[in-house]
Structure formats: structure tokens, C-alpha cells
Image (cartoon, helix red, strand yellow):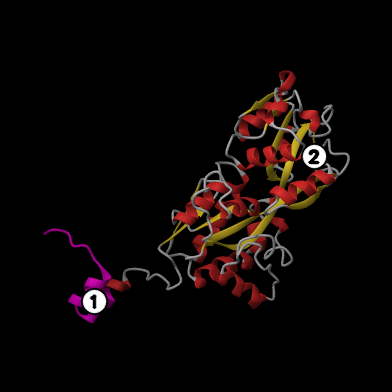
Amino acid sequence: MAPTTINRRSILSTVSVALVTSVLSMATPASADDPEFLNIGGGPSGGTFNVVATGLGNLMREAFPDSVVGVQPGGSGPNLLRVSAGEADIGLTSASNATDAWHGRDPATPDKPIKNVRGLMTFFPSAIQIWVDADSDIHSIEDLKGKQVSAGQPGQTSWNAFNNLLAVHGMTTDDIEADGGTMHKLSWKESQNGLRNGQLDAVMWVALYPHSTVLATETARKIRVLSLDEAKLDEYLSKHGGGFQKVELPVGLYQGQSAPANSVGTKTFLFASDKMPDDVAYKVTSTIWDNLDRFKQTHALLNYISDETAGHGMAVPLHPGAAQFYKDKGIAFDEPALN
């Protein structure tokens, strides 16, 4: 006899109620709240986004037992593209990336701005950081002229931010490459390896702080972060600062950091599509909050999450489901910077 595929709707129309009851008793019915799939946009293997997304996936599998929960490799920009296109359901990104994508300034979205994403919860901060050897003679942006420098690769968030930072100093990458300098178009791993072994004089990235990879680099050499000129930071914020704000990186952030460093920073947050049902967004948000102590064990940076930070700094509009959760808990949240 040919095998028969069991379909609940066809059963309801063709067999008795007794048979329906028998068939359904052999399966776990999906909750009305549970989507069929819940795909999470994380980051490169071994990176912070990947670690956090994996921990988040573990929580979601328990909260949505009848959903297929997966964690995808990605990154701040790729996650926006995938969630917007319906290829992922939730993801991690930064307020600066989300702002650029919203306005079509991101190289990946100039013809199709991404405005269909909604915030769920802020996780931790990141900042523009220019790392140099603690004993380096580099103390300003101007000192990078003629040096060996990496700021990622063209089109990446860090590359764009570095070029904007150079612009407010009246410089371009051509100035870096004067007198024997080179702008090396390298990956994150290649850049950190170059800083560690002394082949690079400086690496600039929009990154978490302190970053675990940079801390690992300090097994070879002490590192410090350049402090940026306050007036130039004001100009950067006025011209290119969507999703950024001034931050001070503290003494002791890295072994060679003997003085505070001025920079601009952004927030990393969890977001969803605006098509996610309100009850699902509510459940995702409440699951994180109700298991916050456990979630924080996933990565030390998650200790940033509190009732004073969770609803702030996302830039994009808050998802109505998350907003309702925060209202129910009495947690304050921002009016969106983007609308």
C-alpha cells in the first residue's frame, strides 16, 4: 500500500472526530503563539554576535518548543538585510547601521532603504576604536599619515566610519598612504593578527568594548585606544552621526589605557521585522527578561542590560509587542529617533 501523508486539515474534512482525536494525540500541537520557524541572525563563527545569538537561541527553543529555532551567521549589516527580506526573523545590529540602512546610506541599501524593522531590546554598547601599541607614537588621527592601517574592507561599517572620521579631519585615505603608508583592506581576523604581530600600526573598528579579541592581542603587546578631538567628534556627529553619541572609554579598558579616551558610540540591539505578530514579539522580549540572569551568563557584555538600558538607544521604532511588555513591566523606553 502506498504511504499516506497525514494533513490535519484533510483529516478534519474526511475522517471522524474519533480518528482526528487519535491522530492529534500522537503529536504535540503547536501553540497559537509559536511561529513555524524562528531564525536568529547572529555573526561570524566564534564572534560575540554568534555567541550571543547562540545563547538567545537556547532560550527561544525552550519558550517556543514547537518552533524550529535556528541561528544564522551574519553581522550587523547582513542581519538587517535578511530580516527585512524575511530570510530571518530576529537579529542583532547596531543603531548606527540601522540608521544608515533606514536612510539608504548603507552601501548595501542605497536604492532600497530598510524601514520595516522594529526594535526589541538593547543588549550592549559599541564604539569607534582605533587601537595602537601602548608605546606607539600615534596619538591622533593626523599621526596615522604614512602608517600601516586597517579599517576593515570597503563597504563595511567600520571602513565607512573611518572615511567619515578622516573627512572631518580634512583627510582621505590618500593621506594615510603618503610617505610609505598603506590602507590595508583586511578582515577582522587579519587586522587583529596584523596588530598582534606588529605588521600594522593601527586598527580602527566600530566594535564592542572591551573586545575579547583585542584583550587576546594583549598577550603579545599592550594596547591603547586613541582619544579623539572633541570638536572633531562634534563635527562627526553633526555630519555622519546618525545612531551615534559621545562616549568616554575608561582608564584600564585595555592594559595600555592609562587615560580616558573620547570617542563616539552606538548601541547593539535585538530587532525583528514589523510583520512579526505582536504576541510573538512580546514573548521573545519577555523570555529574555524573565531569564535575564541566565542570559547574561552567555557573554559578559550582556551585563549591560537593565531596566534603565533595555528600552533605550535602538533608533528604530520599538515593536508594538515589545512596547507592550515594557509598559506592563513599567520599564521606560525611547520614542524612536527614526519614524
Three-letter residue code for mark 1: Leu
- Residue drawn 55% across and 49% down? 42
Write down the quadrant of residue 284 in the picture: bottom right
Residue 172 locus on image (x, y percent): 70, 32
Q: CA distance from mark 2 to mark 1?
A: 65 Å
The answer to whether one can see residue 196 in this image is no
Residue 339 locus on image (x, y percent): 60, 65
Q: Residue furthest bottom?
A: 17
Q: Residue furthest left?
A: 1
Q: Secondary structure at mark 1?
A: helix
Residue labelled with disc 2: 254
Nearer the observer: mark 2 or 1; the answer is 2
Is residue 208 positioned above or below 66 on the image? above
Q: Residue furthest top?
A: 180
Is residue 277 positioned above or below 139 on the image? below
* Start-end of magenta stretch: 1-22
Residue labelled with disc 1: 12
Q: Residues within 10 Å of mark 1 (few under 14, many from 20)?
A: few
Asked if the stretch drawn in magenta spans residue 76, the answer is no
Between discs 2 and 1, the one toward the N terminus: 1
Residue 160 locus on image (x, y percent): 64, 40
For the N terminus, which image quadrant? bottom left
Report whether 266 appears left or right of 154.
right
Three-letter residue code for mark 2: Tyr
Is residue 23 positioned above or below 219 on the image? below
Q: Secondary structure at mark 2?
A: loop
The answer to whether one can see residue 339 in this image is yes
- Residue drawn 69% across and 27% down? 174
